[in-house]
Amino acid sequence: MKKLALPIVLLLWLAAACGGLGAIARYNHRAGPGAVTQPQWPSHSTLTFDHTRFNLVLALHPQCSCSKATLSELERILSRSGERLTVYALVVLPENAPASWRESDIVAQLNALPNTQILFDQNGAESLRFGASTSGHALLFSPEGTRLFHGGITESRGHIGENAGEQNVLDLIQRKPALCEETPVYGCKLHNTVEAQQ
């Protein structure tokens, strides 16, 4: 009887481990909801459009650990784009967000990036103008104000490495044809309440 018990326990453990790994994989590859964005830079945006460069708007939740990978990819994009790109980082602050959210790891990473302007987006008003609903949503606009691409610049949640979104941005700012106009966004919901994030 004892000889039978050990294989059964091992099989049950293996099944549980496989199930857990499968759940993690599904979570890592579950994109945020699709976004409805405008084909041109929103005329009612409070951001100052830079007509001399491509403009990248990136919406982020300051408590989204998945978005640290997005900022690593953004750093790679900036290092390869020269002076062709201006970045606007919208750090979404829900109502009653603690003051410490303005000093999160996400904000610290942003402060270290060149050509990047940070806007603390109270209640997500500005990110909503651009149609962003998931942390890590990037929108690239031409110097003429036409939206060329929108989506994520990581392959999955928290994944650092080459991916279609990053490559699209790099191709477009070099005036090359892009692989696609949209990619999935992997991150936390932007417009959750403070309670939902704690």
Image (cartoon, rainbow, N blue to C red):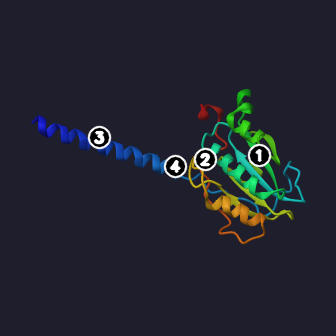
Q: Residue at x 73, y 37 (%)?
A: 107
The C terminus is located in which quarter? top right
Choose the circle earlier in sequence order: 4 or 3.
Answer: 3
Q: Residue at x 62, y 62 (%)?
A: 164
Q: Amino acid at mark 1?
A: Ala
* Location of residue 11 in the rendering, given as x and y in whole percent from the top left corner: 24, 44
Q: Which residue is mark 4?
A: 28
**Vertical arrangement, residue 109 with respect to residue 29, above or below:** above
Q: Amino acid at mark 3?
A: Trp
Image quarter of residue 77? bottom right
Marks 3/2 in contact by CB < 8 Å: the verdict is no
Residue 187 bears which disc, if any? 2
Badge 3: residue crowd in 10 Å (few <14, some 14–19, many ≥20): few
Secondary element type, mark 1: strand
Residue 89 bears which disc, if any? 1
Q: Is residue 79 left or right of residue 185?
A: right
Q: Which residue is mark 3?
A: 13
